[in-house]
Amino acid sequence: MNLLAPWIVKLGQLTVLFYEALLALREIHKTPRLVLQEIEKIGVNSLPVVILTSLFIGMVSAVQTAYQVKDFVPLEYLGVGIAKAVLIELGPVITALVVAGRSGAGIAAEIGSMRVTEQIDALTVMGINPVRYLVLPRLIAGVVSLPLLTVFAEASAIMAAAVVSKVVLFVPMSLYFTGIQMFFAPVDLWGGLAKSVVFGGIIALMGSFHGYYAEGGATGVGRATTEAVVSSSVLILAADYILGTLIYG
Amino acid sequence: MIRFEGVWKSFEGRPVLKGISFTITPGEMVAILGKSGTGKTVTIKHILGLLRPDRGRVFVEDVDVTRASRRTLNALRRRFGYVFQGAALFDSLTVYENLALPLKERGWPREKRDEAIRWALEMVGLGGTEDLYPAEMSGGMRKRAGIARAIVARPDYLIYDEPTSGLDPVTADRINDLMLYLKEQLDVTGVMVTHDLVSALKVADRLILLEEGEIAVDIPVDRAFEESHPAFRAFLKAAGLLERQT
């Protein structure tokens, strides 16, 4: 029971923080500038690394898919396999993991250092709700940014795979895209994007949570950063399984 | 008026405050003294509900802070200025933006905000630093900017947490003069937490010494040198004030 107690406390704190963030939505009109700033930090600034990662994911997908199916399936269908994998799974998950490493850590470090230098207490004594000022803008930015980043990631991966298919595997681009069009199901796209909305919320919430409750100076901030990345990565994969089952199961 | 009634507080089973009671009357400046870890900062954090006691009550005027709703607490907090030990300025904001934040929250119009910020910065001798970021300022300047942020909305109460810690003696003395000046100019009720007895003797009207989570001494400042409590004598001695007096 003693081993479970800290986990129960953390779960309680996380629930309260999320609930308070939802309550703070009533005062969202006071923080539009902060939301835009966070969208820039989480979304716009993550775009280069997300695109770069997605290019390689697309390229390796083409090579791997061809290697696995070439004896059973004509390579004309290569685009279908790659597109479905990218839209349903790789695009949302890889984007979320990259953003968790980049922005989730940044959120935890920023809020954590504000906690240990009493800046969060300073907000409180000014009568400013720190959850509304710090957590809510990041939560909204996460939920808004992740689907947009995922669209860029998916487009980049599919294009990179198309180039590799043509140059390395000699599959004409027209054939590659015709295959994608023939077997495209809207649920592939919206299902993946729906998952990315949840992933964005997880990244922002876990980063905020670990930063908000950081303690113990610089060491505590470092620990909060690590825990934010690890916990959001695990939760992203767990949520991916649950949502995948619900949407495609 | 601020009143503590039998306040107890423990952290992880370790008692920090053991039933302390005291009252700060309007217009009074009280210094809470004590060695590190005796619960000085914990005490003042109870005044604004940043910490809640395990037992006992804290009143500000007729508001029971320990049971007040969030709305009541927020309204109360806006009547306070709080100077944090490390200033707690927001790194990503300029001095102007740091001071403007509490005023924006109160819905002050731009013109009134600008006037208040100019006044507060002049009061602490930081006129012309509006565009600086905290990282571009010295420790003493940051402390003064923290004081400016605390007074910018003309509070009824001022709380100072270790206002002179980490400063060189000359800067510390400037901060003491500034606190004295603000006390006279603003006529606020104040609490300062410090282990700097020289600062307390200069600024406060009353001294409270915390020892092992209890109030060991509670005296007017003009009786400081008559006090015989060993812990208080040790403070006087450590500050070099006993020799100076003899």
Image (cartoon, coloured by chain):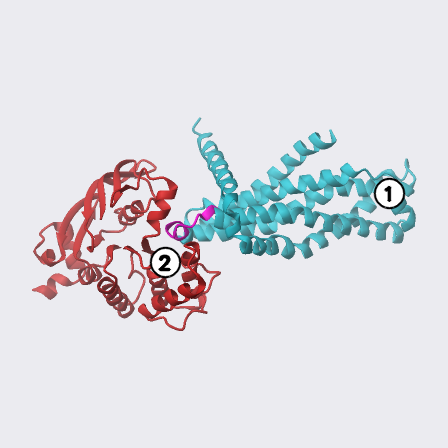
Q: Nearer the viewer, mark 2 or mark 1?
A: 1
Picture coordinates of residue A104 (x, y %)?
A: 57, 48
Q: Which residues are magenta?
A: A122-131
Asked if badges 2 and 1 are on one and the same chain, I answer: no
Proximity of marks 2 and 1: CB atoms separated by less than 8 Å: no
- Tell me the element at label 2: loop
Which amino acid, by three-letter code, is at mark 2?
Answer: Gly
Horizontal placement of B70 versus B234: left or right?
right
The colour with which the image depicts chain B is red
Can see residue A171? no
Picture coordinates of residue A59 (x, y %)?
A: 79, 50
In the picture, which quadrant includes the N terminus of chain A? top left
Residue B98 is one of the magenta-drawn residues: no
The image quarter in which residue A240 lies:
top right
Which amino acid, by three-letter code, is at mark 1?
Answer: Gln
Q: Which mark is residue B86?
A: 2
- Would you name the residue on which mark 1 appears? A181
The residue that appears at 32% across and 56% down in the rendered structure is: B81
Q: Nearer the viewer, residue B133 or A230?
A: B133
Horizontal placement of A91 versus B161: left or right?
right
Q: Is residue B78 above or below residue A73?
A: below
In the picture, which quadrant includes the C terminus of chain A? top right
The chain letter under disc 2 is B
Picture coordinates of residue A58 (x, y %)?
A: 78, 48
The image quarter in which residue B123 lies:
bottom left
- Tell me the element at label 1: helix
Q: Is residue B181 above or below residue A14?
A: below
Determine the residue located farthest toward the bottom in the rendered image. Answer: B128
Can see residue B48? yes
The colour with which the image depicts chain A is cyan
